[in-house]
Image (cartoon, rainbow, N blue to C red):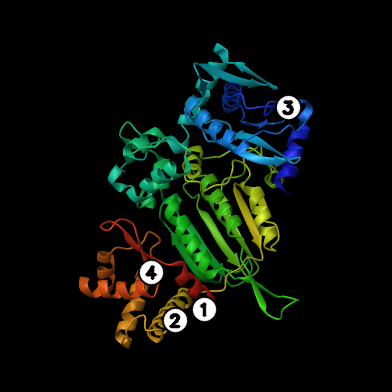
Amino acid sequence: MKDEQLIKKLIKKGESEQLEFKESVHRDTIAKIICGFLNAKGGVAFIGIGYQGKPIGVKNAVAQAESLNQYLYNSITPEAPVSVSVESFANKQIIMVKVGKGSNTPYVFGRDIYIRKEDQTKKATAEDISSLIVERSKTELHWERQLTLGIELKDLDELQIRKTINDLKKYGRGKIFSEPEEFLSHYGLFQNGNLTNAAVVLFAKNPTRFLPQCRVRLTVFKGSKSSDSFIYDKIYEGNLFQIIEELFQFFEVNIAVKSKFSDLKWQREDIAYPKLALREGLMNALIHRDYSNISGSVIIAFYPDHLEITNYGQLPPELKPADLAKNHLSLPRNPDIAHICYLRQMIEKIGRGTIKMIEDCESKGYPKPIWQSESGRTTLTFPKITVTAKTDDVVNDAVNDAVNDAVNDAVKKNLIDAVSDVVSDALIDTVNVVIASDKGVSINEIMNKTSKSNATVKRYLHLLKAIKMIEYKGASKTGRYFITPKTLSIIKKKT
């Protein structure tokens, strides 16, 4: 179902505790409404919609939305993930402001606290404020906010923290910080000199040392669910961002491309798999899993005819699997983890990611994803998404072939001088070291892995850069070497 149809269904319901219409952008009024939503159950405000849902539209909607987004960010405290977007409805542009239930109540606009009661936004009474404070105290005892014993700041991946800070600057979704400690403290990940469980999940270099339930298992089975025979099995133990990158590298190399023959021209056309859908589904599993369960891992299982992503933790009582195909409010089990991913723009607009997943699958000719939530876990199934590369040997063979082909091609085109078989093998070893790390590698790391001297490794890297097998990213002294998209493309074609 397209966005406009979903908006139409929402507007048709009329104003309620979680829905408000406004004809124009009155920033203070909208801020009070959003503050009220945060202190209640969350909600949606449509701007450019008049009495009884009549579409009026907003002039200069994009500019006004950007200004409103910044205003809400600066005027509501504590900071909350508010989604402001421009939408098309009845041939007019309207603004949609959407927010989930806040996890740090009470929220304040100006000097006042607002609450949502039925379809009205009102100043909170002393009794309302007392209830919100009690609710916040319960939230602060939540698993995410509990302190992890034994971990120090030096155990965190500073590169991932600085990437997050850079994304804050790039996307403008939160306050900008220059130092990691300030950033962690502001977002509740570092409290009174101690790191929280959420900080470990997001940024620890080795999170399973402190929280073994952070593991993710990926298995490729030979047969059906009843089969205990598999051809690939790997445990991922990095932080959330490392796992995402490593899994998507596996997806890029291994997921089968759907092919068909055109009726108009007798040649094969390859159709990409739904990358957005898989990314969103994977993010949901990692963000919404029940980390409080010591056995609560995420399991990714490829079968001959489908893919399953399972995480411990059922959907919240307010949501049923069928609701995920509709426009719904976001109810994250782990709001701190979800908020950091939101800041990095790694999840879709609040409550709409599942809809985008369905659209992505349909646009690429795949069946709709299927959600099931029972027996303490949630499973997302992608029919007809399978893998082609079956084992590490297949992938390694593909890497070897890719480097050999690239070297031979470069020699033929006089891009590099002819190299011996020994050097060609060394180049393959170097590429294997680089491709094994989603975070990139330094010269010293390659030297340690290949047992080659600094000068020799520099020569190999120079050759590999010349044929665009690898690339260097970052500052001259602190940057790292990464595999290029060209290399991944060659490997995928060979598997």
Q: Looking at the image, do the residues carrying marks 1 and 3 touch, with CB atoms under 8 Å apart?
A: no
| Extreme residue toward the front, this view | 60
Please name whichever residue, 327 or 165, is drawn nearer the observer in this view of the structure.
165
Q: Looking at the image, do the residues carrying marks 1 and 2 touch, with CB atoms under 8 Å apart?
A: yes
Please name whichever residue, 21 or 329, is drawn nearer the observer in this view of the structure.
21
Look at discs 1 and 4 and give the one toward the viewer. 4
Q: Amino acid at mark 1?
A: Lys
Q: Which mark is residue 494?
A: 1
Q: Amino acid at mark 4?
A: Ile
Q: Which residue is mark 3?
A: 15
| Extreme residue toward the top, this view | 126
Identify the secondary structure beneath mark 1: helix
Q: Which residue is mark 2?
A: 401
Please determine whether, in this image, residue 142 is positioned above or below residue 363: above
Please determine whether, in this image, residue 282 is positioned above or below residue 122: below
Alpha-carbon distance for marks 1 and 3? 56 Å
| Residue 160 visible in the snapshot | yes
Q: Position of residue 290 (x, y in %)?
A: 52, 44
Identify the secondary structure beneath mark 3: loop
